[in-house]
């Protein structure tokens, strides 16, 4: 099919036209930066190859390949992952998770009294069920030839994005269930804005029980509500301006203050605008189990002239300490 | 999540009799701390209201690989703690799910639990201390009571 391979995604065939790479080298069903790096590498290789070529068609092809359609979909950014500790498992590994037993007591005694021994009981485990995310992409060779731009790459990115979205939907459901299981861990505030008082309430409540919140997943626009914060009864006065210079600069440049209340705000446009999820260290919250990694496969259908790529992944979420989780809900 | 299925600590294990080699009759009914009796087949079952109790069921299920439940399987080996027992107990081991007061008399109730109401046949003991508390999640305490339970051979079938 090809005489030269540029990166893993794009190859130039003997007819000096762009083709999608051989299936075995086109395993692109990876998430995030790794995927982008691959596509970047491929384009850079193409640029390098074009520069050393005097072939006019090569240069035309280069131009065509760089003129991708302007992307109308915002890049998805995973956010539930900040609340889970990653746990990678082999295919045959047991995913058992030991469960905590709330035992351990001391007692006030008189001098002659014997100590009371506390004995652990049944040591239990749990095995969260895996769910499978599948992605599949098939592209006709004729489509690739006539498109003139790396259409498969765009498609792969989008399917990877949607797999990430599915993962977040599952992760969020687990977070919501855990938060709902502990009274008072979902704080609802009215007014349609993130208020200092609302956020302070959550921070204080978390500090009170010994599981302080140190990270939050938040929509960037919601975080910018901070610009409306007032200091006490002094209108139009941002309390951040009483802080260090870096804080003032942060407000001017980004319309929000990071690290307010000791919280690292992880911004993602994929976080629902009216919900802010907060927790402490993910090691004290739960696990995200990845069972066997991504199983990818590619094939070529020469009858139909189609390249096919699929990816299958098994995931499971588990929360061991719902007390470390909180949600601040902004009533619209 | 926390798995504590109730706080039941036998605090005089040296005094109690630990009768081993028994088996649970049915799955998902017996666990540590429940009042149990031997049925006509010599297997251990949880007590019902006003049953004569043979003792307290006890198995840490260490012969089961990674158990996901505190409840015993059918025919799983279990030990019966019997004789004279003192224990610290939380409200989950009482039929009304509330702690009885000091000196309350205790009887067998449905599900192997204890209750302050019952017939003489089901009498098992009384509350001898009410002033203890133990840690509870996330950073609180819960009150437990100390009970004195007496099981003797007459309770055996």
Image (cartoon, helix red, strand yellow):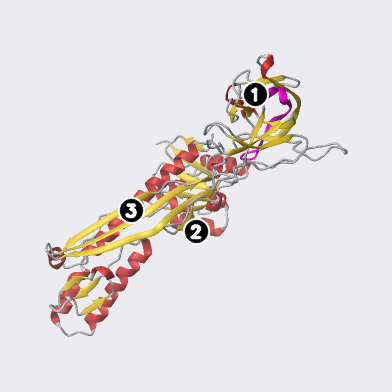
Q: In the image, residue A268 lies at what x, y percent?
A: 40, 52
Q: Can you say whether A253 is above or below A221 in the image?
A: below
Q: Can you say whether A208 is above or below B157 in the image?
A: below
Q: CA distance from mark 1 to mark 3?
A: 61 Å
Q: Chain of mark 3?
A: A
From the image, which quarter does the C terminus of chain A lie in?
A: top left
Q: Which residue is mark 2?
A: A249
Q: In the image, residue B144 lies at what x, y percent?
A: 70, 30
Q: Can you say whether A248 is above or below B29 in the image?
A: below
Please report the residue visible at 75 percent of the width from the left and 31 percent of the height from the top: B86
Q: Is residue A266 found inside the magenta-colored segment of the image?
A: no
Q: Which residue is mark 3?
A: A163
Please report the residue visible at 42 percent of the width from the left and 55 percent of the height from the top: A290
Q: Nearer the viewer, mark 1 or mark 2?
A: 1
Q: CA distance from mark 2 to mark 3?
A: 37 Å
Give the numbered dot on residue B157. 1
* Residue range (magenta): B136-157
Q: Is residue B144 found inside the magenta-colored segment of the image?
A: yes
Q: For numbered disc 2, what is the local secondary structure?
A: helix
Count neighbours of disc 3 (C-alpha within 10 A) and say few if under 14, some if 14 to 19, many if 20 or more: many
């Amino acid at each position: 099919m090809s005489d030269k391979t540029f990166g893993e995604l794009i190859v130039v065939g003997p007819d000096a036209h762009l083709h999608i790479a051989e299936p075995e080298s086109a395993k692109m069903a990876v998430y995030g930066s790794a995927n982008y790096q691959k596509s970047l590498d491929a384009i850079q290789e193409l640029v390098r190859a074009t520069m050393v070529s005097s072939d006019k068609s090569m240069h035309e092809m280069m131009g065509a390949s760089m003129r991708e359609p302007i992307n109308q979909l915002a890049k998805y950014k995973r956010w539930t992952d900040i609340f889970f500790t990653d746990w990678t498992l082999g295919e045959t590994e047991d995913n058992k998770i030991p469960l905590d037993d709330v035992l351990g007591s001391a007692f006030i005694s008189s001098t002659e009294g014997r100590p009371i021994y506390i004995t652990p009981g049944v040591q239990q485990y749990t095995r969260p069920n895996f769910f499978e995310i599948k992605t599949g992409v098939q592209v006709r060779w004729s489509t690739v030839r006539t498109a003139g731009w790396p259409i498969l790459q765009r498609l792969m990115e989008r399917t990877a994005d949607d797999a990430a979205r599915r993962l977040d939907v599952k992760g969020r459901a687990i977070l919501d269930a855990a938060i709902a299981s502990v009274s008072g861990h979902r704080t609802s505030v009215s007014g349609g804005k993130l208020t200092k008082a609302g956020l302070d309430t959550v921070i204080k409540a978390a500090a009170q029980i010994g599981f302080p919140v140190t990270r939050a997943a938040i929509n960037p626009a919601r975080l910018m509500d901070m610009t409306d914060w007032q200091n006490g009864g002094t209108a139009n006065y941002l309390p951040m301006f009483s802080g260090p210079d870096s804080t003032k600069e942060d407000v001017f440049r980004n319309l929000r203050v990071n690290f307010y209340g000791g919280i690292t705000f992880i911004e993602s446009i994929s976080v629902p605008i009216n919900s802010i999820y907060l927790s402490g260290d993910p090691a004290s919250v739960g696990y995200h189990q990845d069972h066997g990694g991504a199983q990818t496969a590619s094939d070529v259908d020469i009858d139909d002239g189609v390249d096919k790529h699929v990816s299958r992944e098994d995931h499971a979420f588990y929360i061991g300490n719902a007390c470390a989780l909180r949600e601040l809900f902004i009533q619209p | 999540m926390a798995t504590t299925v109730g706080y039941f600590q036998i605090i005089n294990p040296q005094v109690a009799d630990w009768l081993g080699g028994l088996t649970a009759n049915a799955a998902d009914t017996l666990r540590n701390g429940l009042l149990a009796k031997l049925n006509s087949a010599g297997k251990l079952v949880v007590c019902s209201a006003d049953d004569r109790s043979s003792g307290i069921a006890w198995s840490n299920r260490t012969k089961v690989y990674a158990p996901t439940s505190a409840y015993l399987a059918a025919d799983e080996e279990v030990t019966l703690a019997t004789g004279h027992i003192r224990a610290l107990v939380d409200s989950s081991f009482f039929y009304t799910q509330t702690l009885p007061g000091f000196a309350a008399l205790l009887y067998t109730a449905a599900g192997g639990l204890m209750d302050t109401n019952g017939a003489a046949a089901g009498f098992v003991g009384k509350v001898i201390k009410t002033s203890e508390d133990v840690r509870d999640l996330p950073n609180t305490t819960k009150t437990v009571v100390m009970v004195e339970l007496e099981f003797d051979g007459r309770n055996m079938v």
